[in-house]
Image: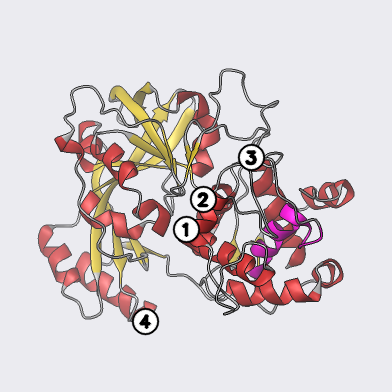
Amino acid sequence: MRRVPRAVLRRLRAQTIVSVGAGALVISVVAGTAAVAITQAVGHAPRAGAASDSANAPATTPNATTTPNATTALGGTAPAAGTSVASSAVPPLRRLTPPDAIVHLTQPATPTQLARLRRRVGVHVVSPVDHGTLQIGRVRLSVVGVALGSIRGFTPSLTASSTPLWQSIARGELTVAFAQSHKLRHDFGNTVPVRTGRNRQGALRVGAFATIGLPNADAMVSRRTAQAFGIQPDREVLVAAPEISLDALKADIAKTLGRHARVTITRIAPVNQSVSSSYALAHIPASYLDLYRRAATTCPGLPWTVLAGIGTVETGNGANVHRSTAGAEGPMQFIPSTWAMYGYDANGDGKADVMDPVDAVFSAARYLCAAGAGRGGTALDDAIFAYNHAWWYVREVVILANEYA
């Protein structure tokens, strides 16, 4: 793998990382100096030299194993104590419906209010969620309590399609966003003492790390678990209404939930893929620059600069294409199991070729999009982490993305 020159990193790390692309997408870089060790990583596996900061990780961290299903890291599959296997059954995923808005309430919405909002023209899905805080040792998490049947489609594709993850939540276990996972890596798969902001105490098993993709959600539990811990019920409402304007949606929410309801817009904003810096023009080959821009348009909200950052860190934009000791191949360094799921024939020659730059870059955009990269913020950080399980990797990609913008 080709690493970013030290002089460039020193200069960029001194800058405040604010935005990527056209300036509309804020990226929060997760702090921390050690890579996260995942006990059972699922999907695009850490590659040799890529996510193996084992020298910085505690010696007690279990070794990583990989399976070919994506985005989540599961802390085993045994049901929690006192929980039957039947209780871990989850509703099937029907469709993906990224939220267009999150409504913050001072008082829970009534069933009548929610029914009226669901009947508004253009509103597809309305899902109330519980919201509060959990404390695990010194780690404070913003947690949402969710109804599995309605919330599943609001999460990124890879998370939504992971039945073991939702079974874990149904058993009463805790799912933690990748952005917070490094703080709890020692607790992964273990049952840990937990207390809430209302001073209720108990224990939860840290069952999964995943890309949650919802603003202000560091962790996720079932509504039954949230209620047991006294987490405030129905304090947020997620709304999917992709076919109506944001002004109309805000007006509908105000009419049905009251003028004190505070609305956060989460609809994916378009990114200007034509913006690039002189640094990008000088350091990225023209053929790859064009590929990154074109591929990014297939994932609304994904800046081309993130694809370019990954391509630079992986192989120097095709300058050092190699097969890693973990078996990763091609300009974007896919392992075979991930390529089998996400590789596709982007250039129309009848074959999905991991060594072909066009196929590889478009397939990388496809994978990142499924991991929630188009949602921006910590969801983008999590998607990059899902691509390669190391926080130093996320930081380098984001640093380069900002430099390329």
Q: State the predominant SS element of the stretch in magenta.
A: helix
The Cα atoms of the two marked residues, 3 and 1, are separated by 31 Å
- Reading the chain from its start, which is encountered first: label 3 or label 1? 3
- Reading the chain from its start, which is encountered first: label 3 or label 2? 3
Q: Mark 3 = which residue?
A: 31
Q: Mark 2 = which residue?
A: 337
User: At x 63% / y 35%, what residue is drawn?
Assistant: 35
Point out which mark residue 245 bears: 4
The Cα atoms of the two marked residues, 3 and 4, are separated by 36 Å
The magenta stretch is 304-319
Query: In the rendered image of this protein, does residue 348 appear above or below residue 168?
Result: below
Other-residue count near label 3 (Cα within 10 Å), few / some / many at <14 / 14–19 / ≥20 = few
Kind of residue at disc 4: Ser
User: At x 56% / y 65%, what residue is drawn?
Assistant: 363
Q: Residue furthest top?
A: 60
The Cα atoms of the two marked residues, 2 and 1, are separated by 7 Å
